[in-house]
Amino acid sequence: MVGRYTRAFRTRQLLETLDHAIAKSPFYRHHLGAFRHQVKSVDDLGLLPTIGKEHLARHGLEMRTSKAFPIRFGISSGSTWGDFRPSEPVDSLSSLVDPAISFQTLQEMEAMRHIQQRLFSQDSGDKDLILQIISASHGIRYETSEDGYIHTPLESPFHYAHIKRLLRTQFDFDGYHPRIQNVAGGLNSIKLLSELIRHDPEREKLDLQLERVLVYGHHLTRFWNRRLEEIFACPVLNIYGISEMSGATGFQCGCGSFHMPPFIIPEVISLDQTCRPVTQGVGELVLTALVPFTEYQPLIRYRTDDVVLQNDACPQVPDMGILPLGKKTKTIQGSDYILPSFLLDEVLEKVPWVPKKIAEKFAVFFNSQPYGQPIYTVNHRPEKRLPVEILIACNTPDRPSASEQARVVAEAGEKLLRLDGSKVNQPLIELIVT
């Protein structure tokens, strides 16, 4: 249940956002102008049409409310559509998809930084030093040095040598803790750093004094959560967010779900063509960013393509809780059930005879050792009520036993969910190992 003050704030800012977007953005003037009079409060948001990544790709410039030059050109990495069009060979330049481009002004970035400082303020003592592993996948983000962020890439052995030195250095910056206490970065970069530390012959000399590690960008499985906490010897905080929308991020709550901040309105809509509101269970996440936190390129009812399980029962945060289950394009869906890609990956990644993708950055350091996601294909014909066939090309000399395959099938079957979020009683999975 959304708190009274949050609902009032969102209603006020939503109406201002709509007026601002329609008055100053050519795209929204055409897209939303005829619907504006129908929206009186946040409860009416569902009356407006949605937009998606394809709108950002085709009409991103028209969405702007100003012709001022932005400080940031953000770019989608292709995680929704894939980096290539499936109908064409990947070695063809014509197969590349059009990326979605998002813009941000310096004022918006400063406002977001101010919010983060308020959310994570330290009342007393020295401020934390944060090692931020940067990546250019979504476009460079401009950060100010005064926040205690130390930015570094992790693309070559030289970068790792630099990070090692930073982690064991005793600094003397005024007002800051002398040692780096937090490490933050995309999950693949943090995985890579953890494996470099694990294989480092000088591991004991690092004398890590970390309080937390923050990861984002990909699904953090339980296997990797345990592994990261063991190597870094501190808690790992999981962050969910989308790169196209500034501020649309949330930490995993004690209830297990993620919550959006008040200046982002979350909705969940059905996975079918009706796009009806979902108040409980599984659906697609839709987000709206509010002014004045997002003014330059408004995003109103933006479809994230993320399948989530909605959960309102949280004793700490009076707002919608969501648990990401995977991309809609990669989720297996039947008439009344789904098999989320994230949950299936949870099962298969820890099985030794399931091949793994070779993570591009890992290959630079580890001679192409496969630290990526599990490799499998799925055959599914829901109209005939046939089992979901999971095809795996076994990468070990000995084929897994029948009992081992049955165990994997049983565990994968536990990840099947009905659209209301409940478990599926009837087994609908068949494992085919070649």
Image: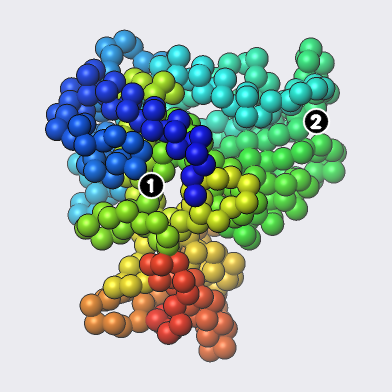
For mark 2, give the secondary structure.
Answer: helix
Crowding at label 2, few (<14), some or many (≥20) Cα neighbours within 10 Å? Answer: some
Residue drawn where x is 30% and y is 48% of the image: 81
Q: Which percent across, then down, holds residue 62?
A: 21, 24
Q: Is residue 369 above or below residue 389?
A: above
Q: Is residue 162 above or below residue 287?
A: above
Give the left or right position of residue 180, taking residue 46 as reference.
Answer: right
- Labels 2 and 1 touching (C-beta < 8 A): no
| Tally of numbered tags | 2
Residue drawn where x is 37% and y is 72% of the image: 337
- Along the viewing direction, whichever of 15 and 389 lies nearer the viewer: 15
Give the left or right position of residue 337, taking residue 110 as reference.
Answer: left
The residue at which mark 1 appears reads as: 267
Give the left or right position of residue 144, taking residue 194 as reference.
Answer: left
Q: Which percent across, then down, holds residue 422?
A: 46, 71
Where residue 87 sits, quadrant-wise, is: bottom left
| Residue 243 visible to an observer of this rendering | no
- Mark 2 vs mark 1, foreground winner is 1
Where residue 216 sits, quadrant-wise, is: top right
Amino acid type at image mark 2:
Arg
Residue drawn where x is 62% and y is 16% of the image: 145
Residue drawn where x is 26% and y is 54% of the image: 275
> What is the quadrant of the C terminus in the image?
bottom left
Q: Which percent across, then down, holds residue 343?
A: 49, 64
Q: CA distance from mark 2 to mark 1?
A: 44 Å
Crowding at label 1, few (<14), some or many (≥20) Cα neighbours within 10 Å? Answer: many
The residue at which mark 2 appears reads as: 168
Amino acid type at image mark 1:
Glu
